[in-house]
Structure formats: C-alpha cells, structure tokens
Amino acid sequence: MDMIKVLIADDQRLMREGLATLLALADDIDIVAQAGDGVEAIELAKAHRPDVILMDIQMPHLNGVEATRTIRSILPATQIIILTTFDDDEYLLAGLRAGACGYLLKDMPSEQLADAIRSAAKGQSPIGPEMARKLVNLVTQNPSAAAPPPAVSELSEREIEVLSLIADGLSNKEIAEKLFIAEGTAKNHVSNILSKLEARDRAQAVARAKELGLV
C-alpha cells in the first residue's frame, strides 16, 4: 500500500496534534510534519515533499493563501487542501486562485477528511458541500468573480516596483522621486497596474497585490 505523505499547517497546536492523531488511524496516511505558520509550512514542504498539505488560512508570519501560492510554485505535484473555520467567499476564491485543490471546513467528520486527502492525492478537488454551493452561486451570479486572477507575468518589473511603493502609501510624486522618473510616467504605471489588477483604486490594487503575494 502506497502511503500518502501529509503535512499539517495550523497555528493552533491542539488542532494540529488532534488532526495528526485522528489521521494516523488511517492505514494509508503518514503525517510527515506539522507547521505552526506559513513560513514553516514552506520550509517543511521543501524538506518532506508531501503528497498533500492541510493548510489553515489565518496563520502568523505568512497566511495560508500566500503559503499555498509559494508551495505550489516550488512543488507543483503537492496538492493543498485549505482546511479552515472560515466559510467566506473571498477566502474560498483566494485559496483556489492560489493553487489549492480543495477547500474544507474544520467541522467535517474525520472520516470524510481522510477521504478528501485520498481524493486530493489522486488529483481530484475535494470541496465541502457548503463551499461547493457558494462556488456555484459565485459562478452563476457573478462569473467574473470566479475567473482566474490576472497573471503576475502581465506586470512588468517596474510596475511591481511601483506597486510595492503604492503599498507603502507613496503618492505619484513620491514614487517618481523615489524611482527617478517623471511624475507623468509614475501616473501611467499606476494606471496600468489598476487596469491589470482590475482594481478600482489604489487601495483595492494593494489588497489584490497582497492576495496574489506580490507585496
């Protein structure tokens, strides 16, 4: 029997250990590591190369969405299931956009969680019924909301640099001075950034950038 290597990332120690204890009862699941935050999850993922990661959303130092994005870029074969208490639409979309294959709530039975891990290891997408309904509603009511985010590659290096300065609260004039460019050029960069990130203003652009792990 092939063992499924699983990493658990959750900032609550009791939750981590409880999940590990329950899942250890399954003959085909091997808990290879436990992480207390997103940064540790990335390091342990690189060290153990798990088949599946159970990833919490809200963690210190680096949240689960950003950790998911990073791990998926490094280990594309590793499947990540968001396991959280949050049934929020934005978290659902952010997690899936970051590369998670599934999204489950922590109040699900342990037997179903084990089955979800097996499904993820086979390349399937386990999503709890409540979240599946939310996803269907999002797609049917607002198709653009479920569309993939703009490709990071669409932003030039200079635009990413400008985006970082926007996140620091700098004005167009201050950005121009910082980068030794004309204020008009800085303004054009900002306009292009808003367009590419489909943001209505600078604040939303920064929020999108954080969601995408750009700043």
Image (tube, rainbow, N blue to C red):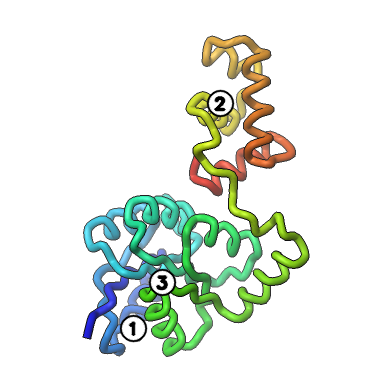
Q: Which comes before the other along the chain, label 2 or label 3?
A: 3
Q: Position of residue 138 (x, y in %)?
A: 71, 65
Hey, which residue is sitting farthest right in the picture? 141
Secondary structure beneath dot 3 equals: loop
Secondary structure beneath dot 2 equals: helix
Q: Is 149 left, or right, of 17 in this rendering?
A: right
In the picture of the structure, the residue carrying the numbered disc 2 is 162
Q: Is 199 left, or right, of 5 in this rendering?
A: right
Q: Is 45 left, or right, of 198 in this rendering?
A: left
Task: Classify 10 Å Cα crowding around label 2: few (below 14), some (14-19), many (20 and above).
Answer: many
In the picture of the structure, the residue carrying the numbered disc 3 is 123
* Disc 1/disc 3 C-alpha distance (Å): 19 Å
* Disc 1/disc 2 C-alpha distance (Å): 46 Å
Q: Nearer the viewer, residue 125 or 208?
A: 125
Q: Position of residue 197 (x, y in %)?
A: 63, 40
Q: Which comes before the other along the chain, label 1 or label 2?
A: 1
Q: Nearer the viewer, mark 2 or mark 3?
A: 3
Amino acid type, label 1: Leu
At 54% from the left edge and 56% from the top edge, which residue is drawn?
Answer: 97
Instruction: Tell me, yes or no, whether the two marked residues, 1 and 2, touch with CB atoms within 8 Å.
Output: no
Task: Classify 10 Å Cα crowding around label 1: few (below 14), some (14-19), many (20 and above).
Answer: many
Q: Nearer the viewer, mark 1 or mark 3?
A: 3
